[in-house]
Image (spheres, grey):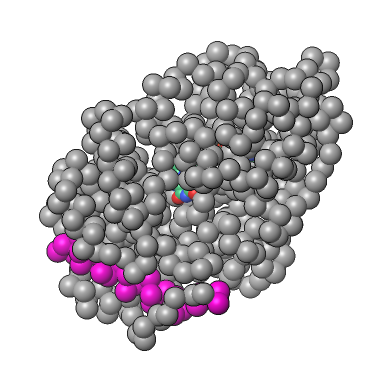
Amino acid sequence: MVALDGIAMSTDPTQLELKSQDYHWYSPILKAQLQDCRGELIVRPVTEDEVIRVVTACARERVKLVVRGGGTGNYGQCVPLEGGVILDITGLDQVLEIGDGWVRVQAGCNIMALERAVRASTVVPGGQELLMYPSTRDTATIGGFIGGGYGGAGSVRNGILKDPGNVSRVRIVTIEETPRVIELDDADIQKVHHAFGTNGVMTELTLALKPAVDWVHHIALFPTYRRALEFGVAATEACARANPIRGSDAPPVPPGPAIDAFEITAVDQRFAPFYADAFGDRFPAGQDAVFAMVNPRDLPAWRALVHRFGGTETMAMTEDELTREGLVPAFECAWNHTTLMALRHDKSWTNLQTVYGWPLDIDLVERQMQRYGDELVMHHEFGRDQHGFVVFALPLVAYFDRERLYEIIREHEADGCLVFDNHVVTIEGGGMKTIDTAQIDFKKLADPHGLMNPGKAEGWLPEYARP
Ligand SMILES: Cc1cc2nc3c(=O)[nH]c(=O)nc-3n(C[C@H](O)[C@H](O)[C@H](O)COP(=O)(O)OP(=O)(O)OC[C@H]3O[C@@H](n4cnc5c(N)ncnc54)[C@H](O)[C@@H]3O)c2cc1C
């Protein structure tokens, strides 16, 4: 195609196989369903103008298109269900501008590179940091996080991506014969956030920053999972005292210490064998763990809280110290990395993504642990959104078959847990549950021919496509 002259591209079958995959294989159901899906051409633009040339050609020829960042998404977010072009966005990797409290960055920028850049910048003495990142910080792109992610390390302190102010501007290229560039601000960003790349190519983002903290990566061990969760609840409340939730509907927080933290994760002791290579005696068998990132300023108060709940500290190191010792950071012991740790040892595990109410019903968690025995291994993430506290869980599940998996999901729903079903490919079937009409309306503008990531938006009907 002359229109694409000078733009890197490939039809190499090995590359096509690799770049047609993401981390959907956590789910045996999706693994079977998506194993033969392949894109037909990989293109790697390095400027917005090149992106525009690629999407112009796709729109003119009515070729399907999947945007790909780091390819770490679950749910098959990046898997081309109907072939077509894989638009590798990682060539747009520049940090464009850093201000006091914000950064403007190209969407294909690796998140770790971005974090390093804002920490190194002298705009604010001592540097700045991102408000949150997925546990895939080192491999994912910032655009992929907005397109497919939700929250992660930092969410216990700063909320989730969706909360007002965390992402303040997104620049989008539409998929039309003559593409337009649209900038969405503030609340309008929800039109493309978590839309699985179905409604426009993000090329630039503006994100909020805060002054950098050299977080201490911490492990505390507890004699029971109940104690680990009780500590997690108390630590989350302590974090909210240090960083108050400002919404008018914010839940009351009892008096106590204020302790700044970036990550708080409780991990069931049955995970210990999967962590042995990474941590050895720091997470031995027979004890439940809380992995955390704590402000060094508040470490004495954190240690006192650990002690109050009968815990023992086995690690307290900055990221530089961890790197020197060859240890992994606490956020890579959290979120979906916990499942990855288990899968590296035994491929028969899968997981669920569930949400519990606040205050966390620890009796319910114990009843669930009794109900499932070794069929399910617990892991909870403490977080918040603009309205209050949120406790996510990503328990390991020993996969038997689809019927049994959905029986477990129904039981969790009957328990009052919300389940983000990571065994389906659509936006609505996974986390969102309902059709987001604002996203579909925006797709009518930004992808009028319905070429982007087909099969992922249930709300998009064939008759919406402009001929
Ligand atoms: C081990 C592991 C841990 C994880 N931890 C977390 C976590 O802590 N929090 C969390 O929220 N998620 C998590 N995830 C999911 C995933 O890693 C994150 O959502 C991540 O940010 C995705 O970034 P990526 O660059 O890999 O995106 P990709 O997988 O490349 O893309 C994700 C989606 O966004 C779309 N997209 C990508 N770039 C663009 C663009 N420029 N314009 C339009 N659409 C685009 C893609 O088409 C796709 O639908 C985890 C996944 C794994 C496997």
* Residue at the image position 54 percent from the left and 50 percent from the top: 112
The residue lying furthest to the bottom in this view is 255
Magenta residue check for 234: yes
Q: Quadrant of residue 315?
A: bottom left
- The residue shown at (57%, 28%) is 455
Relative placement, left or right, of 7 versus 379 is: right
Q: Is residue 179 visible?
A: yes
Name the residue at 71% across, 26% down. 463
Tell me residue 126's x, y (percent): 59, 71
Place of residue 19 in the rendered image (x, y in percent of width and height, measured from the top left)? 55, 25
Q: Is residue 433 above or below residue 264?
A: above
Span highlighted in magenta in the image: 221-248
Residue 68 is left or right of residue 263, and the answer is right
Q: Number of labelled discs?
A: 0
| Residue 135 locus on image (x, y percent) | 44, 49
The quadrant in which the N terminus is found is top right
**Residue 31 lies in quadrant:** top left
What residue is drawn where x is 60% and y is 18%? 83
The quadrant in which the C terminus is found is top right
Magenta highlight on residue 95: no
Q: Position of residue 421 (x, y in %)?
A: 41, 41
**Residue nearer the viewer, 453 or 11:** 453
Query: Dominant secondary structure of the magenta stretch?
Result: helix
Residue 282 in view, yes or no: no
User: In the shown orientation, is residue 362 left or right of residue 240?
Assistant: left
The residue closer to the viewer here, 415 or 322, is 415
Residue 425 vs 275, above or below: the answer is: above
